[in-house]
Amino acid sequence: MRTKDLVAIRDLHIDEVFEIFEESRRIKDYTKRGMPFKPLEGKTLGMMFSKSSTRTRVSFEVGMYQLGGYPMYLDIKKSMQMGRGETVHDTGKVLSRYLDGIMIRTFAHDDVVQLAKYSSIPVINGLTDLFHPCQILADIFTLTEKYRIIGGLTVAFVGDGNNVANSWLFGAAKTGINLNIVTPKGYECDTKLVEEAREIGKATGCTIKTFNDPIEGVKGVDVIYTDVWASMGQEDEAAKRIKEFEGYQINSKLVSHANKDYKVMHCLPAHRGEEITDEVIDDEAHSIVFDEAENRLHVQKGILYLLMGEFKA
Ligand code: CP
Ligand code: NVA
């Protein structure tokens, strides 16, 4: 990898996206065969969180351990001086003297940009209000396992034009997946991001379309993807959003408009009965939600190895 950090898929070269998939596949194979692979022995990853997490925390912690390194959980609000006002600048400079890498989950995307700028060690974005790159890399990796060729597939992201949708824009653009972003009026992705992704997508031949009509948006697609309607930090808007997202639920009626071999994805956690029904998420013939969750572990191991491995010195 030429980049020091993983702040956004937007920053990765197309080849780097596929390099992550290749390494992740190799490391996943070692893990499945029970072959130890510990290239990060003696290295420490600081894992800074100011939001809740199940998958990101556990998969990074287990992944770092399996690679031979040490994962250190740091609660920004409860136990770090940054939670009391120490600057991102000073935090990045100091942590670079102790650690070999940082993973951070927080609110403001710019904090991650600044942390990467002032740290001399790799910084990995574990979700901000703007992007969730590790999730979408694991999602697209999962599609590479399910389909012989991913270029030309069509994915419909149905729901809020949020951090996950924004990362899908760039994930699709860099891998040649066609993307329909299907949102209620007022919840669209930022048009600047859509335009930027369309521009990048010219190189891979993908099309990125936006819809407000859920049926039109999922018509004939290969994959239907959704996420919660109210993200972390938007809990106060949850009740209002339930009303405004009516008709955008992924249920058996909506999926009937997709390609007959459609697959369903969700980054989780799910609000069952809101954005997705039990029937759809638990339908083993179509739902690949738990394979997708497992791949967070394997793909993050690929990312950690590429960013923190010896050859990076
Ligand atoms: N998908 C995801 O990032 O899950 P967590 O919030 O549990 O980490
Ligand atoms: N959009 C969700 C994703 C959680 C993994 C959130 O930010 O809360």
Image (tube, rainbow, N blue to C red):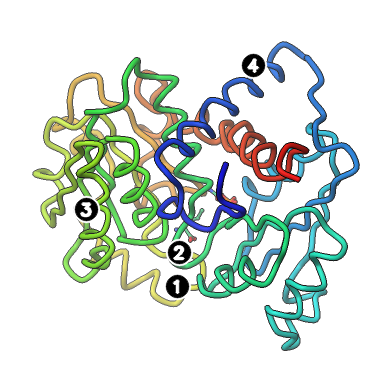
Q: Relative to 127, is 78 above or below?
A: below
Q: Nearer the viewer, mark 1 or mark 3?
A: 3
Mark 2 C-beta closer than 8 Å to ligand 2: yes
Q: CA distance from mark 3 to mark 4?
A: 35 Å
Q: Nearer the viewer, mark 2 or mark 4?
A: 4
Mark 4 C-beta closer than 8 Å to ligand 1: no
Disc marking residue 199: 3
Q: Residues within 10 Å of mark 2 (few under 14, many from 20)?
A: some
Residue 223 spot, x, y in % from top left: 28, 32
Q: CA distance from mark 2 to mark 4?
A: 33 Å
Whichever of callouts 1 and 3 sits on the residue coming sooner in the sequence is: 3
Q: CA distance from mark 2 to mark 1?
A: 5 Å
Place residue 203 in its image quadrant: top left
Q: Nearer the viewer, mark 3 or mark 2?
A: 3
At label 2, the amino acid type is Ser
Q: Secondary structure at mark 3?
A: helix
Residue annotated with mark 2: 231
Q: Nearer the viewer, mark 4 or mark 1?
A: 4
Q: CA distance from mark 4 to mark 1?
A: 39 Å
- Callout 2 touching callout 4 (CB < 8 Å): no
Disc marking residue 29: 4
At label 1, the amino acid type is Gln
Mark 1 C-beta closer than 8 Å to ligand 2: yes
Mark 3 C-beta closer than 8 Å to ligand 2: no
Direction from residue 275 to residue 272 in the image, left or right: right
Residue annotated with mark 1: 234
Whichever of callouts 3 and 2 sits on the residue coming sooner in the sequence is: 3
Residue 83 spot, x, y in % from top left: 73, 81
Report the front residue among 131 and 257.
131
